[in-house]
Amino acid sequence: QVKLVESGGGSVQAGGSLRLSCAASGNPEDSRCMAWFRQTPATQREGVAAIDNLDSYYGKSVKGRFTISKDTAKNTLYLQMDSLKPEDTAMYYCAAHPYYCHGYMLKNGGADFTDWGQGTQVTVSS
């Protein structure tokens, strides 16, 4: 099991930037694939981005604006969010599982992921 702790959320105006972090503790092999999901009270959980040591994947709504990266030495996941829009407002969750990522894993609500953080709120005002 992996413990995931997110940080970096906050409030920003449209067009601004934020960087989220997710520190993972435990066996690094249990977090081979790490990802960001987001959810609002009115929406289902949406896959934002995922990464392993081979590739990275993005949801359609964030591609070109968000960048996912991972510091393997620190076992810390990042999400650089640029050109933020009000529709990016959500609780952002870090997730992990011990297998390689695949693009479809962002499309099924996080069902493939075994470990989750507590979430960090991002609010974008117009």
Image (cartoon, rainbow, N blue to C red):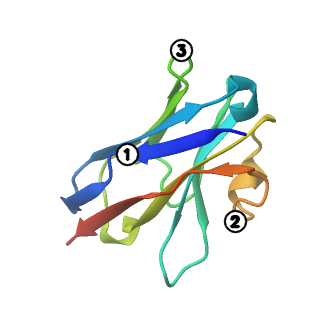
Q: Position of residue 113 (x, y in %)?
A: 74, 51
Q: Relative to residue 101, is residue 25 drawn left or right?
A: left
Tell me the residue that label 3 is attached to.
73
> Residues under labels 3 and 1: Cα distance?
18 Å
Q: Could you tell me which secondary element the residue under label 2 belongs to?
A: loop
- Which residue type does callout 2 highlight? Gly
Tell me the residue that label 2 is attached to.
109
Task: Give whichever of discs 2 and 1 has the lower sequence position.
Answer: 1
CB under 8 Å between callouts 2 and 3? no
Which circle, 2 or 1, is nearer the viewer?
A: 1
Which residue is farthest bottom? 42
Q: Quadrant of residue 75?
A: top right
> Residues under labels 2 and 1: Cα distance?
21 Å
Q: Relative to residue 48, is residue 2 drawn left or right?
A: right
- Above or below, comparing residue 64 to residue 33 in the picture: below
Q: Relative to residue 88, is residue 23 drawn left or right?
A: right
Q: Residue at x 55, y 79 (%)?
A: 43
Q: Residue at x 78, y 35 (%)?
A: 98
- Which residue type does callout 3 highlight? Ala
- Label 2 environment density (alpha carbons within 10 Å; few <14, some 14–19, many ≥20): some
Tell me the residue that label 1 is attached to.
7
